[in-house]
Amino acid sequence: MTNTIVPMMQKFMTLLILLSAMAVLAPAQQRSYDLQTADPESFSIDPVALHELGEELFRRGTQAFLIVYKDKIVYERYLPDWDRYQPHGTASAAKGVMGGLSLMLAMHDGRIDLDDLACQYIPQWKDDPLKSKITIRQLGSHTSGIDDSTQGSADQYTLPGWKGDFWRQERNPILISRDEAPVVFPPGTDNRYSNPGIGMMNYAVTVAIKDGEHKDIRTYLWERLIKKMGVPREEWNVGYGKTFETDGFPVVATWGGGSVSTRAMAAVGRLLMNQGHWDGEQLIRADVVEKVLKHSGMPSRCSGGFWLNTDIDGRVPWPALPWDTAMASGAKDQMMIFSPMRKLVIVRFGDDNLEQGSYAENVINKSIGIPLAKALGDPAPYPKSTKITDIQWAPASTIVRLAAGEAKRDGSDNWPVTWARDDDLYTAYGDGHGFEPGLPQKLGMGFARIAGDAEDFTGVNIRSNAENQSTGANGEKASGLLALDDGIYLWVRNADRKGAQSRLARSTDRQRTWTWCDWRFEEFGHIAFVNYGKNYEGARDNFVYMVTHDNPSAYQTADHFILLRTSKDKLMDRSAYEFYQGLDENGGPIWTNDVKQRQPVFTNPQQCRRSSISYNAGICRYLWWQQISSDGNSDTRYIGGLGIFEAPEPWEPWSTVYYSEKWDVGPGDLACFPTKWMSDDGKTVNLIFSGNDNFSLRKAVLTVAE
């Protein structure tokens, strides 16, 4: 009975949500910038959890609430007096969606940069010992030291002196910000929310664009961005409807005073979510959007007027939301939230705070993040596997950890593995002392041999002519190993000694000495071999397959992975390599010798990093382990997630076996399923991973559909 009622209830709730939205939205005519709506269940979103989220928000003073997921509107609701095209006051959300946006556009045009001194544009500050040191970045991140114009919970319009004058605007608030607001700490050393600081960012951008066609940021934004996006003028109002003439410059304020419709606000979020790209046109360069929305070491969680989901210590204040989440927010919790990684935009307008006495940045994890995460589930990029329906990890207490090093964070990481002809596993480690007893010196890259089975094994270090003592990105590290015939092949990353490029070597004496190719892949930063059985037994054909994320750096993400291959006897010959180019009409792979013609074999925007693939002969499936970061950091030794995907071939279609942005233990920066340590039926596997900077081993049991 229960199993029947739950699906029926979900369908009923979905229908209720859609009918409610249609009832509210029916009278309004579609705008050219609008997105299409979609059934939440078409994205595997729980409609009941989504409905519960909306119900709770509307009990807390919400007037308009909209969620865009993967460029489709999956939830939208308004109170009777509101609709999707009716402008709503932004309050301080204007700092980001108008002030930050105008800064990005000026940076796109090459007229200003985050690390420019503000006095380049505000000459009155040049001789001031503190103001002369303020940068544009500090103005937008509330770290300039300029005092705020508010004073606790006091009515800002009745404050005495320059603070009250700033809000009453009987005098020019831009001049007040420039000449009267004091600097209360050395720039860049602390943070204090500052409306005058944003005003000075507006002033600097206005001066920066003075030689262009559009002289004020209201017109600049409208002509260069908003109009091109198809937003009607009546849905986009900036700066209290005022222009403050200051030293001959028409300055428009964005510390507040905006008025934007819900759909128009979502359109700005979509523009930023897509890194400045709008329907075929790059309106703002992607690198500019990324630069402004990336934490840059200032002692605050803001940049360019936006709140960020990270602080100076790398902590994530909204753990239920993706690490790359940014938010523009204002009084009474007007907010626009977006995440490029999750392809997510959220707009909330209201007439009251979600939680009394707290600002949006302090409550969105509880009020929106946690219930939304419940509705969305893990953001796996591919559907759940119908072949491997579950994976059960052994308890964390059973994890075997070796190569711990001499001090905390001084163990050994990486650990790619291959199964050689002599029945041993061969591996390589990075930035550590290797297996116990550890080597006296810490190696940037070292080698080892593992004898035995998963329940009883020993690890022995191997001294090699390829070992080095350069740590981090400055030294070559192993990314893939392959035992084939009488040799072992080694891909290393950091081939340029700066964290990028890959090169290949071959050993015929069990990793003691290596012969290197005289070429390298400049395009790829982390190449891993697809490993089959002992000495490459059981391979699908006479080719060697490899996979890499499509980025020259081992420390940066890509939107997708690519697949490459070459004949077994031509691994050292660059001209023999082929690159996956997609599937033909019969579902077979297409290959090209031109690396520039490569096409993705797997896509997961901004989450493709280090990985490894092993073939599980017992169930005839390829198992692809992928590194997933919960905070954007390439170092996932102590915290982070992982994805495991399966396919019947080393190309498409891939399905999700397991996906989590935060595993129960540190997943390490590389892991693999050694084929030697898989049961004959393929249902018991073991994962070698570099969690906690160790050689770590954890058993798992797969549930396999017959």
Image (cartoon, rainbow, N blue to C red):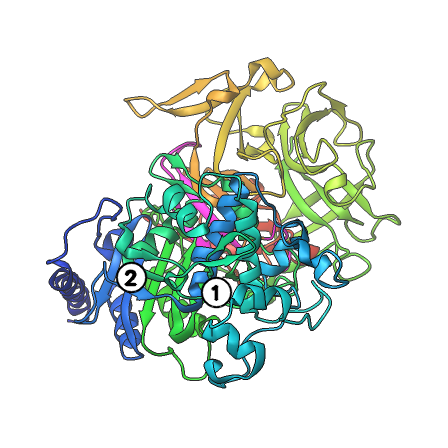
Q: Which residue is at 65% across, 61% downward?
A: 298
- Front one among 357 and 15: 357
Q: Could you tell me residue 125's position as x and y percent? A: 69, 58
Q: Mark number for residue 452? A: none
In the image, farthest residue toward the top: 575
Q: Which residue is at 58% across, 13% downward?
A: 575
Horizontal side of residue 441 vs 636, given as left or right: right
The residue to which callout 1 is attached is 255
Q: Quadrant of the N terminus?
A: bottom left
Q: Amino acid at mark 1?
A: Trp
Q: Is residue 294 above or below residue 423?
A: below
- Front one among 675 and 473: 473
The residue to which callout 2 is attached is 66
The magenta-colored residue range is: 633-660
Mark 1: few, some, or many residues within 10 Å (few <14, many ≥20)?
Answer: many
Q: Amino acid at mark 2?
A: Leu
Q: Secondary structure at mark 1?
A: loop
- Front one among 102 and 14: 102
Number of callouts: 2
Q: Could you tell me residue 103's position as x and y percent? A: 52, 50
